[in-house]
Image: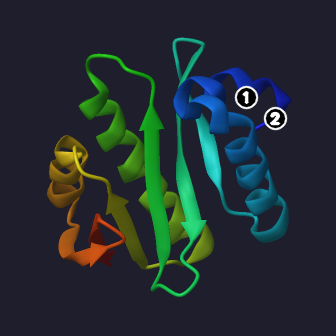
């Protein structure tokens, strides 16, 4: 669960909505035991990623958000692969989805390479699904 020290990262990722998003993520962890993790590299926080319960949808929603940096594709691929394995092994989950906002085509390609496939649109975002 992201601690109080995560606020600068959340502010960098979500601007004025950072404190609110951190509160939501911490509530998800407290209520459901599922939520985003802080992602670090070389001792530096570089993003967040994890799951949300897909209320009204089928499976867990996976998402990532990284600070601007070159070489994120490898990190996104590595994180999503590890997170999916964790969810399968620890939570026995086998249904996942992701929502991609316009402009996230690189993340979409990574998800498709992992096995996600497009499943329509919702609220202006592309929905991709994976069932293992």
Q: Quadrant of residue 97?
A: bottom left
Q: Secondary structure at mark 2?
A: loop
Q: Secondary structure at mark 1?
A: helix
Q: Is residue 96 left or right of residue 93?
A: left
Q: Is residue 69 left or right of residue 37?
A: left
Provide residue 94's location: percent of width, then percent of height: 43, 79
Q: Which residue is mark 1?
A: 6
Q: Is residue 51 left or right of residue 70?
A: right
Counting other residues with Cα less than 10 Å from the Cα at mark 2, is it few (<14), some (14-19), or many (20 or more)? few
Provide residue 110's location: percent of width, then percent of height: 20, 48
Front-lying residue, 22 or 110: 22
Question: Would you say the residues marked 1 and 2 are in contact, meaning their CB atoms lie under 8 Å apart?
Answer: yes
Q: Quadrant of residue 29?
A: bottom right
Provide residue 68's location: percent of width, then percent of height: 37, 20
Question: Which disc, if any, is residue 55?
Answer: none
Q: Is residue 48 above or below residue 12?
A: below
Q: Which residue is mark 2?
A: 3
Q: How many discs appear?
A: 2
Q: At 34% from the left edge and 39% from the top edge, which residue is drawn?
A: 76
Front-lying residue, 1 or 11: 11
Front-lying residue, 23 or 52: 23
Q: CA distance from mark 1 to mark 2?
A: 6 Å
Q: At 47% from the left edge and 85% from the top edge, which residue is drawn?
A: 57
Q: At 30% from the left edge and 27% from the top edge, which residue is drawn?
A: 72
Provide residue 58's location: percent of width, then percent of height: 45, 86
The C terminus sits in image quarter: bottom left
Q: Is residue 58 above or below residue 76?
A: below
Counting other residues with Cα less than 10 Å from the Cα at mark 1, is it few (<14), some (14-19), or many (20 or more)? some
């Amino acid at each position: 669960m992201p601690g109080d020290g995560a606020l600068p990262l959340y502010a960098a990722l979500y601007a004025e909505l950072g404190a609110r998003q951190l509160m939501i993520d911490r509530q998800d962890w407290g209520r459901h035991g599922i939520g985003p993790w802080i992602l670090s590299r070389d001792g530096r926080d570089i993003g967040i990623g994890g799951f949300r319960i897909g209320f009204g949808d089928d499976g867990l929603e996976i998402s990532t958000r990284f600070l601007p940096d070159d070489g994120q594709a490898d990190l996104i691929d590595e994180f999503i692969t590890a997170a999916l394995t964790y969810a399968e092994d620890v939570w026995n989950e086998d249904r996942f989805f992701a929502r991609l906002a316009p402009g996230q085509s690189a993340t979409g390609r990574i998800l498709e390479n992992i096995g996600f496939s497009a499943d329509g649109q919702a609220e202006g975002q592309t929905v991709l699904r994976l069932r293992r």
